Amino acid sequence: MSSAELSVFIQALGVHAPARKLTNEELSSMVDTSDEWIKTRSGISERRIAAADENPSDMGAKAAAQALTRAGLTPADIDLLIVATMTPDVPFPSTACLLQAKLGLRRDIPCFDVSAACSGFVYALQVGTDMMRSGAYRHALVIGAEKLSSVVDWSDRTTCVLFGDGAGAAILATTSAKNVGVLGNLLGADGNNAELLHCAAGGSATPATPESIKAGKHLLRMNGKEVFRHAVRVMSESCERVLAKCGVKSEQVAWFIPHQANIRILEAVASQLNVSMDRFPSNLDRYGNTSAASIPLALEEAWRAGKIKHGDLVLIVAFGAGLTWGATLLRWHEPTR
Ligand code: UT7
């Protein structure tokens, strides 16, 4: 960061989770599974399911409205909107444009989606941070919003028990103070492993047809075991690399906020980093894997519980379909304190 560049920090967070809870017991009556299997293998007890007319742009707009209120800002104050989602309302236009209209944001601002699956929030945060460092934008909204229930195969017990819906929003702001907010980040991808977690049809290569829909090709497919193995490796390495880049030791990090995919993945990453699970807050039990929404949901919960305090080092880390991964180290900054 050059001395002329500004620091970018998260000024406020907001969340929205659909009201409908789907418990493991209910899932056990839909597919051959059990509360015991799901809890032991993933740490999930229940997840939220969006209503038919509750789309990522709606959930994202509600999360953003809460963040705006908490920041004491109005929609007119937002200069940039980035939405991370792998379940956009429609193939086009972007969910960001739909959300812009719902929130009543200004028309002279850039609004676009970032597609990096479960790493989407970390990717969007870096894009937003880099766009803001020069001072060209004063306040940005970075939102992760997902309706995974619409792409999950509800007859496939190996995937349907894992995912849920929701949204989280962060308002980014700038300050001339040094060593606060986003301190460092890294992103990576490996498209050679795209088939490990993907949706085979519905895009321009294979448009949805009655046959492809009948064959379930428009739904999420995953090689869970392989994804698990990659997840532990890339999340641990990403944490180590971003810490080394920033000259910070893992002991100095107050909170690790990982993508909430599976409690056993979180435990394995914590163990690799030699960090106690007490510093890895998780809400997996209540939300399952909400993809790009999972980090802002977990971050907001840890902040609301009073865990994250001004000056704390917070490391967020994610992996997802692509494969993609990313990590961001932040020094939590609350300028009004
Ligand atoms: O954001 C990224 C998204 N993806 C992930 O994070 C997924 C990463 N992977 C995982 O979380 C885990 O691999 C799973 C939770 C998906 C699976 O756990 P696992 O310990 O790797 O189980 P497994 O795939 O080895 O399956 C063990 C057994 C199999 O039966 P057999 O072959 O041993 O008879 C599965 O058929 O468990 C069976 N099984 C189930 N049984 C009851 C698979 N899913 C279920 C289920 N209920 N829902």
Image (cartoon, rainbow, N blue to C red):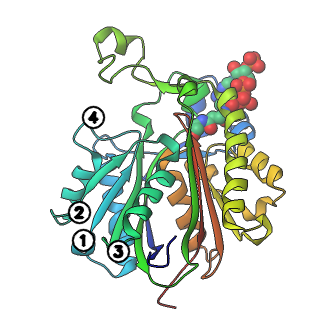
Residue located 47% across and 30% down the image: 152
> What label sits on residue 135 in the rendered view?
3
| Amino acid, disc 1 | Pro
Q: State how far apart marks 2 and 1 are (Cα).
A: 7 Å
Left or right side of 310 for 13 = left
Marks 4 & 1, CB-CB < 8 Å contact: no
Q: Earlier in the sequence, mark 2 or mark 4?
A: 4
Q: How far across and how far down the image is residue 210, in percent?
A: 29, 11
Closer to the camera, 55 or 39? 55
Relative to 312, residue 151 above or below = above
> What label sits on residue 103 in the rendered view?
2
Marks 1 & 3, CB-CB < 8 Å contact: no
Marks 2 & 3, CB-CB < 8 Å contact: no
Q: How far across and how far down the image is residue 123, in percent?
A: 48, 51
Tell me the quarter of the picture where residue 214 sits: top left
| Amino acid, disc 4 | Pro
**SS label for mark 3:** loop
| Amino acid, disc 2 | Leu
**SS label for mark 1:** helix
Question: On the image, numbered disc 4 is attached to which residue?
Answer: 91
Instruction: Choose mark 3 or mark 4, whichever is in front.
Output: 3
Residue located 62% across and 74% down the image: 308
Q: How far across and how far down the image is residue 300, in percent?
A: 53, 66
Q: Earlier in the sequence, mark 1 or mark 3?
A: 1
Instruction: Choose mark 1 or mark 3, whichever is in front.
Output: 3
Q: State how far apart marks 1 and 3 are (Cα).
A: 19 Å
Q: Earlier in the sequence, mark 2 or mark 3?
A: 2
Cβ of mark 2 under 8 A from ligand 1: no
Q: Is residue 285 visible?
A: yes
